[in-house]
Image (tube, rainbow, N blue to C red):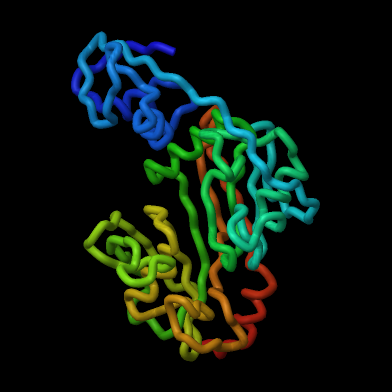
Amino acid sequence: MVLYADMAGERLDAFLARCAEGLSRSAAQKLIEEGLVLRNGRPAKKNDKLNVGDAIEYTLPEPKEVDIVATEMPLEIIYEDEDLLVINKPKGLVVHPAAGHQDDTLVNGLLHALGDNLSGINGELRPGIVHRIDKDTSGLLAVAKNDHAHAMLASQLADHSMARTYEAIVCGSFREDSGTVDAPIGRHPSDRKKMTVTERNSKRAVTHWEVVARYRGYTHIRCRLETGRTHQIRVHMAHIGHPILGDLVYGRKKPELGQTSQVLHAGVLCFAHPRDGRPVMVFAPLPDYFQQVLQKLVKL
């Protein structure tokens, strides 16, 4: 397909995300990196600055066959329409297949429930999954049913217009009622499975938090993500000295109150509908495990 640049000085990847239907900026960058975008007949670079009238030709690759087993499992669907659905994922459920989890993930369940009615953008191994949450984090996850919905939702993630709010129980007490952690996150230098606050090979990460309730030794907080880095809330809370209760990776190394994984729940998801732009706000109440922990705490 051929498009013609209509603005001087615009980056190529930004132009494609704006003008090519169904392409997010990250998807456009991937096409460019794979040599599937030509500028005036020559291979292009993602940061090329365009001139008015430049001919931009791009080719979409054929989606690859995804070898994933469809597995029947209960799925709590909070919202659904012809373009997308929002799942309330339980704690302990892995989102997509990986080593040790080939047929018991959310993707396996989605394939059984929806079959081919899932996006396959970029031929990825996570059909329909627009964003992810950790295995032991519960809560809301958006799933796209077609490539257009996938691209539009992904672009909202990229420009931070998709609002995601989490609730957590953290160790210790806050003096303030609210605050912001603005600290870059990158891979841990010695443990590649972990993330850390670092200036090296990192990306900006911003978490806004507020106190919901104070307890003896613990605090119930609500966090709003401005960015969406891997393990962001867990890393940021540990960084400011308030690790999430039960987080044995970033927090205290021994279980407390019977919790061996983080008490963290994605409770609110807000976005513009990919078809008509109308606002969609979805809520998931605190799950039983979270409420049971609250019942054990002594309120101040």
In the rendered image, which quarter is residue 10 located in?
Answer: top left
Nearest the viewer among 103 and 257 is: 103
* Residue at position x 48%, y 84% in the image: 218
Residue 228, given in percent of the width and then of the height, sits at 41, 54
Would residue 278 be visible to someone looking at this image?
no
Question: Percent position (x, y) of residue 125?
Answer: 58, 44
Task: Name the residue furthest top.
Answer: 53
In front here: 42 or 56? 42
Residue at 54% over, 44% down? 130
Left or right position of 34 against 117: left
Instruction: Tell whether 135 sits left or right of 179.
Output: right
Horizontal side of 140 relative to 223 (left or right) equals right
Quadrant where the N terminus lies?
top left
* Residue in view at x 46 percent, y 89 percent: 217
Is 60 located above or below residue 169 in the figure?
A: above
Residue 90 location in percent, x, y?
67, 63
